[in-house]
Image: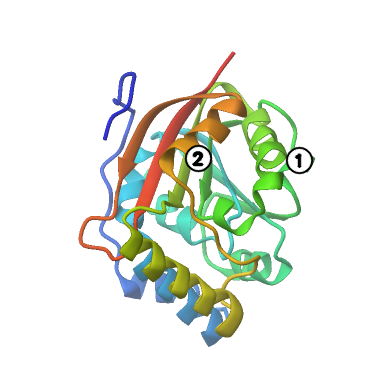
């Protein structure tokens, strides 16, 4: 679904990735971390996300976890540099041990980073773990570090249709409370209008919203926005 503006973006040809590539990249990490990363690869529609990133420039992944997104991106365009930041010390340790080229991983909050420093900022499956009372500051800080006309890519899960909502809710409760694969509060999924309103209030113009949940039991939704000047 294109909601407004020009949907064309500078994209690159995606290389083929398989489980063996990921297993090898994380071969210096504990087997529990390697299995967690593989599970994440299965659950998240990365193949629909990778082509949305610019082919060159400096990319920041906020809430990068084990660094899987940046690993997948690093296999493709070589004229990019990557920074991942997360508050989970154990996952940052895994990302640093993984074999991810042109990438740096930082422990901390996005608010500690300098302004106007990145061409693209991604936030993938982070908002649903944060209380909505924290969204405004978190998103404003994420937009602050974007350079002029920088691209913001946000992937979240929406609450429609209801059967997909409940599947996603149970899946995340299992990941957070039982397996402890994910660190955060009880999950909450919102409508596309609520996500968009918060992204635009933070200083972006959202020009594209697209469902990327084909043949998947979870309603994945991606937002693309440009930093307003």
The quadrant the C terminus occupies is top right
Q: Is residue 46 left or right of residue 202?
A: left
Q: Which mark is drawn over residue 111? A: 1
In the picture of the structure, the residue carrying the numbered disc 2 is 195
Q: Which mark is drawn over residue 25? A: none
Does residue 124 lie above or below 67 as drawn?
above
Q: Nearer the viewer, residue 18 or 87?
A: 87
Q: Is residue 31 left or right of residue 9?
A: right
Does residue 51 lie above or below 215 as drawn?
above
**Residue that extends furthest to the left in the rendered view of this protein:** 215
- Classify 10 Å Cα crowding around label 2: few (below 14), some (14-19), many (20 and above): many
The quadrant the N terminus occupies is top left
Position of residue 26 measured from the top left corner of the image (x, y, whole percent): 50, 73
Which residue shows up at 67% across the image and 53% down it?
Answer: 131
**Residue that extends furthest to the top in the rendered view of this protein:** 229
Q: Is residue 143 left or right of residue 3?
A: right
How far separated are the C-alphas under marks 2 and 1?
Answer: 20 Å
Q: Secondary structure at mark 1?
A: helix
Residue 218 visible to the viewer: no
Q: Secondary structure at mark 2?
A: helix
Residue 161 visible to the viewer: yes
Does residue 162 lie above or below 34 as drawn?
above
Say which of marks 2 and 1 sits in front.
Answer: 2
Does residue 194 lie above or below 19 as drawn?
above
Which residue shows up at 48% across the image and 43% down it?
Answer: 154
Q: Nearer the viewer, residue 193 or 145?
A: 193
């Amino acid at each position: 679904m294109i909601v407004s503006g020009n949907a064309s973006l500078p994209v690159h040809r995606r290389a083929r990735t398989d489980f063996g590539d990921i297993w090898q990249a994380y071969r210096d990490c504990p087997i529990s971390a390697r299995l967690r990363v593989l599970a994440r690869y299965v659950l998240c529609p990365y193949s629909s996300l990778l082509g949305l990133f610019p082919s060159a420039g400096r990319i920041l992944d906020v809430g990068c976890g084990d660094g899987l997104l940046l690993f997948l991106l690093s296999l493709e365009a070589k004229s990019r540099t990557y920074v991942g930041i997360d508050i989970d010390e154990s996952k940052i340790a895994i990302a640093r041990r993984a074999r991810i080229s042109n990438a740096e991983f930082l422990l901390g909050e996005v608010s500690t980073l300098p302004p106007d420093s990145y061409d693209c900022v991604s936030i993938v499956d982070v908002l649903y773990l944060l209380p909505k009372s924290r969204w405004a500051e978190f998103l404003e800080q994420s937009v602050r570090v974007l350079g002029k006309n920088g691209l913001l890519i946000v992937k979240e899960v929406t609450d429609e249709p209801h059967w997909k909502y409940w599947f996603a809710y149970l899946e995340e409760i299992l990941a957070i409370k039982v397996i402890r694969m994910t660190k955060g509060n009880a999950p909450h999924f919102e409508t596309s209008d609520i996500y968009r309103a918060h992204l635009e209030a933070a200083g972006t113009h959202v020009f594209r919203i697209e469902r990327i949940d084909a043949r998947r039991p979870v309603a994945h939704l991606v937002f693309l926005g440009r930093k307003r000047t």
